[in-house]
Image (cartoon, helix red, strand yellow):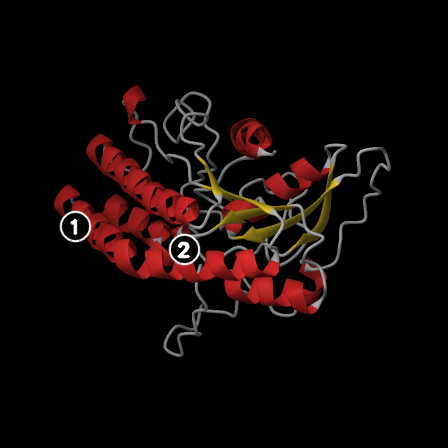
Amino acid sequence: MKLLRIAASAVMTAALVAPASASVAAPPSPLNYVAVGDSYAAGFGTGSYVNACGQSPLGLPALLDERKQIELTANATCSGAQAANVPLDPNDPDDVDVPDLPVQIAGLVAFGKVGPQTDLVTVSAGGNDLDFGGIVRVCATQDVAVCANAIEVRVVGAETTLADNLDSLYAQIDAAAPKAQVIVTGYPHLFSPEFGNTPLLSLEAQELFNDGTDALNEIIEDRAEEAGFEFVDVTKRFDKHGIGSPQPWITFTGFTAIDDLHPTAKGYKSGYLPEVRKAID
């Protein structure tokens, strides 16, 4: 759901370095934790970033790292990342090189940051593959029929192409971290049409987009469970906190910020964190 693939050149080496925060040595030993994924994994949307990938100290990896029994040893997440390696578009001057998830994992392996010692891996991927950020723009500027068609085309394509890419990605993760618990996170509903507000999309378009998010989550969940991974659904946590609600957990400034349509700091802390913590063995 990334709207803009932000500049990420030379970021992989920095992303693979463990955080500076000291771990607390206490029995039992903290879980060796590695994070990979897209902007929703990096913490994009909080407004506070430490590198060109949009990693945030307020995102899920850093929030988990604050827990005494979890130690974040590597964070390779990057805004704009996709489930499969995607070459640069020579006809798109705004397209820049971003470490997609297969590159993230390969880098972790090369640096010795992931392996049999890894206890926990969190993964977020799929939204950028469908260009859901682009679909929002279509739904914001075109009529409902065009919006519905754009969503349907993307979802139908995801049922084959994205599903296959996720299978390959999850196999790569399983090979890289054979002993780890792998938690795959889904995406929240961006909109709360039940409040009757239309800050960006019509109420009907909001419902269509949320339905598209559900379809994407179903594909991700299906492939994750097939791989033996655990899927975490955050839609209930974000219920009544989408765009158009009195207390939104989704950033929206009218497309004046590149991190629009991402969870706020509150969204990561109260939406993602509790669900992922419950899933950790």
Q: Residue furthest left?
A: 145
Q: Position of residue 275 (x, y in %)?
A: 53, 29
The residue that disc 2 covers is: 128
- Dot 1 surroundings within 10 Å: few (below 14), some, or many (20 or more)? few
Identified by mark 2, the residue type is Asn
Which residue is at the front of the view, 45 or 163?
Answer: 163
Count residues near mark 2 (Cα–Cα under 10 Å), then give few for <14, some for 14-19, many for 20+.
many
Under mark 1, the amino acid is Asn
Front residue of 154 and 198: 154
Q: Is residue 235 visible?
A: yes
Q: Quadrant of residue 175?
A: bottom right
Relative to 152, does residue 208 appear above or below in the rendering? above
Residue at image x 52%, y 31%?
267
Residue at the disc numbered 1: 149
> Residue 224, position in %: x, y?
43, 47
Given residues 228 and 128, the one toward you in this image is 228
